[in-house]
Amino acid sequence: MKVKIKGIREPQEATYVFKAGELVGVMLAEDAENGVANVFPMELVEDICDE
């Protein structure tokens, strides 16, 4: 899926992040590939485009 995050110009490939069965945010695919555990909370997600 692609998400539009506040402060980032273009939509980015991302995956959902869950903690204890609850949705807590999204992680960019690029970050996951690089081993960076940067989770954007759902409050920063402006748009989601599931493909």
Image (spheres, helix red, strand yellow):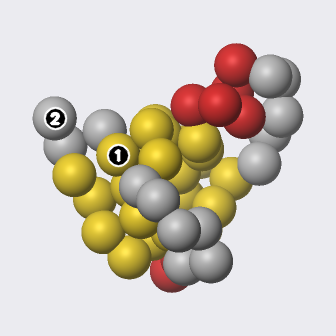
Q: Can you tell which mark lies on residue 51?
A: 2
Residue drawn 57% across the image and 31% down it: 29
Point 53% across, 68% down: residue: 9
Q: Residues within 10 Å of mark 2 (few under 14, many from 20)?
A: few
Quarter of the figure with the N terminus: top left
* Residue shown at the point (65%, 31%) measured from the top left: 30
- The reply to whether callout 2 and callout 1 are in contact (CB within 8 Å) is yes
Toward the left, the furthest residue is: 51
- Point 22% across, 52% down: residue: 49
User: Residue 23's spot in the image, x, y percent?
Assistant: 45, 55
Question: In the drawing, what numbered circle is on residue 2?
Answer: 1
Q: Residue flagged by tag 2: what amino acid is it? A: Glu
Q: Is residue 39 visible?
A: yes
Q: Is residue 40 left or right of residue 44?
A: right
Q: Quadrant of the C terminus?
A: top left
Label 2 vs 1, first from the N-terminus: 1
Where residue 37 sits, quadrant-wise, is top right
Spot occupied by residue 43 in the image (x, y as percentages of width and height):
51, 80
Q: Which three-letter amino acid code belongs to the residue tagged 1?
A: Lys
The CA span between labels 2 and 1 is: 8 Å
Residue 4 falls in which quadrant of the image?
A: bottom left
Q: Which mark is residue 48?
A: none
Residue closer to the observer: 23 or 48:
48
Q: Is residue 31 left or right of residue 25?
A: right
Can residue 23 be seen at all in this image of the molecule?
no
Instruction: Between residue 41 and residue 4, name the one nearer to us.
Output: 4
Q: In the rendered view, tell whether residue 20 sits above or below residue 48.
A: above
Query: Residue 3 is drawn in which quadrant?
Result: bottom left
Name above or below for residue 8 compared with residue 33: below
Badge 2 element = loop
